[in-house]
Amino acid sequence: MKLLVGLGNPGPAYADTRHNIGVRVLERLGSAHRIAFEERRFDSRFGTGRLRALGGEVDVALLAPLTFMNRSGRAVAAAVEGLGLADPSEALLVVLDDVDLPFGRLRLRPSGGAGGHRGLADLIESLGRRELPRLRFGVGRPPADRETADHVLEGFSAAERALLPERIERAVEALETALIAGVRAAMNAFNRDPDASESAPADGAPGTR
């Protein structure tokens, strides 16, 4: 089984903010594969089902912590233990926002640091390892006169909202590819600017830095 985690803050006040894009991507994935995750387990919204894509299929569990962002690790650690997932580096895939990426850009990585993201930092601390596959979804940096914390707790601009559905769909496709074909294959396919030429090499693909 693969455990997919969408990071965000609980409650309707935060639902449409930049910081909750991880949850929104997970919700769209669940909807596309008819996997509801409204059960309450591990201090989270939780559900299981079978994902079929790209000619393959895999059992998945979807988890959206109901803790606040910077306490996400305890919920994920409880799920990892409760589901008997021996190796999070193989079984876990986390979806989160990233202010260092332009809006809508995706970046898959099999491991690494938190990059200033408090939710991911808490996961790394709670699980005791950096080898946690993650899909970062770019939400862009704030203007110079705006604090990052305020920026991520705001909604998307009108121009961003117009593009958001297609960018979320692309993130769902990246997750499906990572689950069926592997993280490396998904990196090569999706770690690129969606507005750039399709012939451009993927960020992180062989031959790039």
Image (cartoon, rainbow, N blue to C red):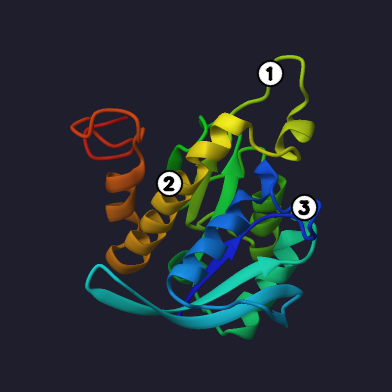
Name the disc covering residue 166, or none.
Answer: 2
Up-down relation of residue 63 to residue 172 (above or below): below
Amino acid carrying mark 3 in the image: Asn
Q: Residue furthest top?
A: 144
**Crowding at mark 2 (Cα within 10 Å: few <14, some 14-19, many 20+):** few
Report the Cα–Cα distance between label 1 and label 3: 24 Å
**Quadrant of the snapshot with the N terminus:** bottom left
Amino acid carrying mark 2 in the image: Glu
Instruction: Tell me if 51 is positioned left or right of 68 in this view.
Output: left
> What residue is shown at x 36% (from left), y 63% (from top)?
176
Amino acid carrying mark 1 in the image: Pro
Instruction: Tell me if 40 is positioned left or right of 165 in this view.
Output: right
Name the disc covering residue 5, or none.
Answer: none
> What residue is shown at x 59% (from left), y 54% (from top)?
22
Name the disc covering residue 143, or none.
Answer: 1
Percent position (x, y) of residue 175?
A: 41, 59
Percent position (x, y) of residue 91?
A: 47, 71
**Quadrant of the snapshot with the C terminus:** top left
Percent position (x, y) of residue 51?
A: 39, 76
**Crowding at mark 3 (Cα within 10 Å: few <14, some 14-19, many 20+):** some
Q: Residue under label 3, please give it.
A: 70
Up-down relation of residue 206 to residue 176 (above or below): above
Q: What element carries label 1?
A: loop
Up-down relation of residue 52 to residue 178 (above or below): below
Report the Cα–Cα distance between label 2 and label 1: 24 Å
When asked about the image quadrant of residue 147, the answer is top right
Q: What element carries label 2?
A: helix
When asked about the image quadrant of residue 75, the answer is bottom right
> What residue is shown at x 28% (from left), y 47% (from top)?
189
